[in-house]
Image (cartoon, rainbow, N blue to C red):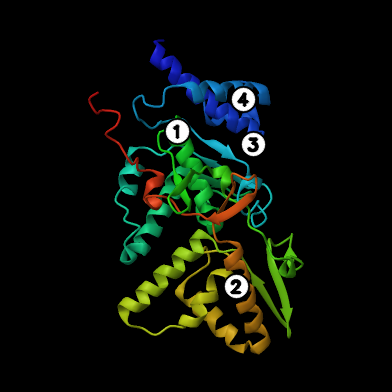
Amino acid sequence: MDDSNKKETEVLNAYVTEEEAKSQINHDNMEKENSNIVPNSQPNMQDAQERMNIMRNINRDSDVHYRENLGYLKIPVESLPSQGLFYPSGVEISIRAARGEEIKHWSTMNDEDIAQISRTDDILNYMIERCCLVKFPGRAGNAWQDLKSVDRFYILLAIKDFTFIKGENQLMVPYAEGADIPVTKEMVDFIEIPEEIAEFYSFDEKCFIFEVNGHTIKMHIPSLGVNAWLKNYAINKNNSREPYDQDFLNFAPMLIRDYKNLSQRAYEEFVSETQLWGVDEWSIVSYVTNLLSSATEPKIKYVDEGGNEKQIPLTFRGGIRAIFVISDPLRAIRRS
């Protein structure tokens, strides 16, 4: 093995070992999923740190590349912004590195064009669908559409880290005028459920339940599948110039648990059922929707120069597109 291949192996091993140490991944399961992972039954933190030091010392000005065929790496559910509170027990979430086909499609994104917001959302979901494997207990297939929307950017950043394991594509977040900080997935903050609605959370049903005037109202953190279905429903209605309840659509993402049983008929029957709700019901739905919308807005946390922990909205220098598109791709081939 030549020196360049040795360095590549060291980089890969360092990244995976650190991720194993963070998530305490079971070695036997990981061995089946990724044959490239160093076969340590449980790496200790000292070894992980030593390997990370090797990775940091490697020249990052070498050829820019992404890794292919690395298999899947598990993400601990409790590390997500949702902390796993809205998923069934036993759910498993794994990611793989993005490959050329996914990055090609991603690079067509123009998230600065308001007219292309819907397309941008589709591309974000495309990357999740292709590079994230979600296993729900007792259910076959990839349940990626059941991921909560609040967790999407964290997972995308994890895929980005596993794609550019040498740190070739560093993301910068503006935190003050003319000042940026590099952002990692670990900086994406947990959601903070307001205390006034936390008492209504059901550990059994993984949602918030409110009993009002004989009506049971269940409110959920929106999922990718529900959001996508509702978006397409509205687009189809607008294109066909058919009327629909636009007011209800504002609340629908938090009133519908999942997309699997959604159809136009089922959805519109649910809309009709809610017509029996009065002032009390809609007041609660509106109030809780506003609270949860604010709580689930993606944010990052960092420590300023004075040692104080700060929180700012998650916005990238160069837009969302910058997650998988290198800002200076010619650097590696530019003549010295």
Q: Nearer the viewer, residue 77 or 164?
A: 164
Residue at (38, 43) in percent of width and height: 324
In this orientation, does residue 167 appear?
Answer: yes
Residue behind mark 3: 23
Kindly identify the amino acid type of the residue bearing the numbered disc 1: Gly
For numbered disc 1, what is the local secondary structure? loop
Kindly identify the amino acid type of the residue bearing the numbered disc 2: Thr
User: Which label belongs to residue 289?
Assistant: 2
> Is 55 situated above or below 108?
above
User: Which label belongs to residue 167?
Assistant: 1
Residue behind mark 4: 49
Disc nearest the viewer among 1 and 3:
1
Residue at mark 4 to residue at mark 2: CA–CA distance: 43 Å
Q: Horizontal and vertical percent for residue 236?
A: 35, 74
Residue at mark 3 to residue at mark 4: CA–CA distance: 15 Å
Circle nearer the N terminus (2, 1) = 1
In this orientation, does residue 41 appear?
Answer: no
